[in-house]
């Protein structure tokens, strides 16, 4: 309640410029030297971030945070925001949340635009940890702050993020509404980014796929493709082809699905999108398994697993191990399946992936059931139900 009150004050201050005045230190020479060192470290940290060297950037942002003690709150909060973003890219979500919280505490009732950026980033970390109610709260705080800034584009991002959570939890009508609102907001802005509009059309198409309306989904995908142009935006186009492949898979058009997954792979490799490449390999394996190409599916997944481990992306690694186990389950290789599932479960508990944890627990239960180990099957299925109930209880704050 206190934070909401602060936010209301922030929203009223939104359009008032805040003077960035440094407190007098009494030692101008020393302070000037420290200021130059801070500027130098921040420059290096930002360069490391731009080059994808996030581990180095994290060390440098931490050094900058120590040097910035005594600087203005805006500078200190910005450093915490950037440090949190680096942690998030390293998939160290708890550390990211700690940095974001420090940033918000520093800001108090100043800099509402920066506060809205931190809340939005905080929501993304909560979502990756499966803490959906807290993610929703962060995105709604972002929307509250940005409503008083005349920038529809700024509102589109948290609105789309809300749509993503609703989609993850199967609230497809709410997800569709959120994505369409985000698209309308983006199109209201003076110069809406093509990639944002295309991604939102892709997201709408994906929800329609989940709802089984494949014709409508393909229309959204084709509109997105027209926006992107042929080969002009390989990263976003790769994501689009990936989702089109998924739609064809759900519609039973398996050969067409393989074709589009392969197109997505070419584009994602062209864009050096290693994370996207891993996800596409994961999708492709399910089509291969459905076509009874189990050996090929396992090879595809081994390639995906190598990429996730190279990237240090434990969340995707856990899901990839689940996929490997699924192929083993399909071929009655129960011992191999259990080995992969227990590895996946350990990883999901480390990263706090509650949504993934309940799936893995349920699959372990199914394997034990297939082996006639009924007491163990019941034990793991009950654990899966308990995790599901925890997720549901966390989602009691969902707006209706």
Image: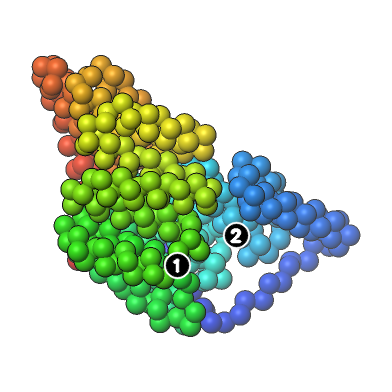
Give the image quarter of residue 278: top left
The answer to whether 110 appears left or right of 176 in the picture is right
Q: Is residue 240 above or below residue 141?
A: above
Single out the mark in the foreground, 2 or 1.
1
Whether residue 56 is visible to the viewer of this picture, yes or no, is yes
Residue at 28% from the left image edge and 58% from the top image edge: 206
Residue at the spot x=38%, y=46% of the render?
A: 262
Residue 196 place in picture, x, y as percent: 43, 67
* Circle 2: element type: helix
**For this rendering, which residue is in front, 241 or 171?**
241
Considering depth in this image, is 357 or 246 the residue closer to the camera? 246
Can you give x and y, in whole percent of width and height, for residue 310 in the image? 52, 34
Determine which quarter of the picture holds residue 138: bottom left
Residue that label 2 marks: 77
Q: Which mark is residue 70?
A: none
Element type at mark 1: loop
Question: Could one spot residue 162 in this view of the protein?
Answer: no
- Label 2: few (<14), some or many (≥20) within 10 Å? many
On screen, residue 393 above or below 32: above
State the residue position of label 1: 229
Residue placed at 59% from the left, 55% from the top? 82
Distance between the alpha carbons at the discs numbered 2 and 1: 39 Å
């Amino acid at each position: 309640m206190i934070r909401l009150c602060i936010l209301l004050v922030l929203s009223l201050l939104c359009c008032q410029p805040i003077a960035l005045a440094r407190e007098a230190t009494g030692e101008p020479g020393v302070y000037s030297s420290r200021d130059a060192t801070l500027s130098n470290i921040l420059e290096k940290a930002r360069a490391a971030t731009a080059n994808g060297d996030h581990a180095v950037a994290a060390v440098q942002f931490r050094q900058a945070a120590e040097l910035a003690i005594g600087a203005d709150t805006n500078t200190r909060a910005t450093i915490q925001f950037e440090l949190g973003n680096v942690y998030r890219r390293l998939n160290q979500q708890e550390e990211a949340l700690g940095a974001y919280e420090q940033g918000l505490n520093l800001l108090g009732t100043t800099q509402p635009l920066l506060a809205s950026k931190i809340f939005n980033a905080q929501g993304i970390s909560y979502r990756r940890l499966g803490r959906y109610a807290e993610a929703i709260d962060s995105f709604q705080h972002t929307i509250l702050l940005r409503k008083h800034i005349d920038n529809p584009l700024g509102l589109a991002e948290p609105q789309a993020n809300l749509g993503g959570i609703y989609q993850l939890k199967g609230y497809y009508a709410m997800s569709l509404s959120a994505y369409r609102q985000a698209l309308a907001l983006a199109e209201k802005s003076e110069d809406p980014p093509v990639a944002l509009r295309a991604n939102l059309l892709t997201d709408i198409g994906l929800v329609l796929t989940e709802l089984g309306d494949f014709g409508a989904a393909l229309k959204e995908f084709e509109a997105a493709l027209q926006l992107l142009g042929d080969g002009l935006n390989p990263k976003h186009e790769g994501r689009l082809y990936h989702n089109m492949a998924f739609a064809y898979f759900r519609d039973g058009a398996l050969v067409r699905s393989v074709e589009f997954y392969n197109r997505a792979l070419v584009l994602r490799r062209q864009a050096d999108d290693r994370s996207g490449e891993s996800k596409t390999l994961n999708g492709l394996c399910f089509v291969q398994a459905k076509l009874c190409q189990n050996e090929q599916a396992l090879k595809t997944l081994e390639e995906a697993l190598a990429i996730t481990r190279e990237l240090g992306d434990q969340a995707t690694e856990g899901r990839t191990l689940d996929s490997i186990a699924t192929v083993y389950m399909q071929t009655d290789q129960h011992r191999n399946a259990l080995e992969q599932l227990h590895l996946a479960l350990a990883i999901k508990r480390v990263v706090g992936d509650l949504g993934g944890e309940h799936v893995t627990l349920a699959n372990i239960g199914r394997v034990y059931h297939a082996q006639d180990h009924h007491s163990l099957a019941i034990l793991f299925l009950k654990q899966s139900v308990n995790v599901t109930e925890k997720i549901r209880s966390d989602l009691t704050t969902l707006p209706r």
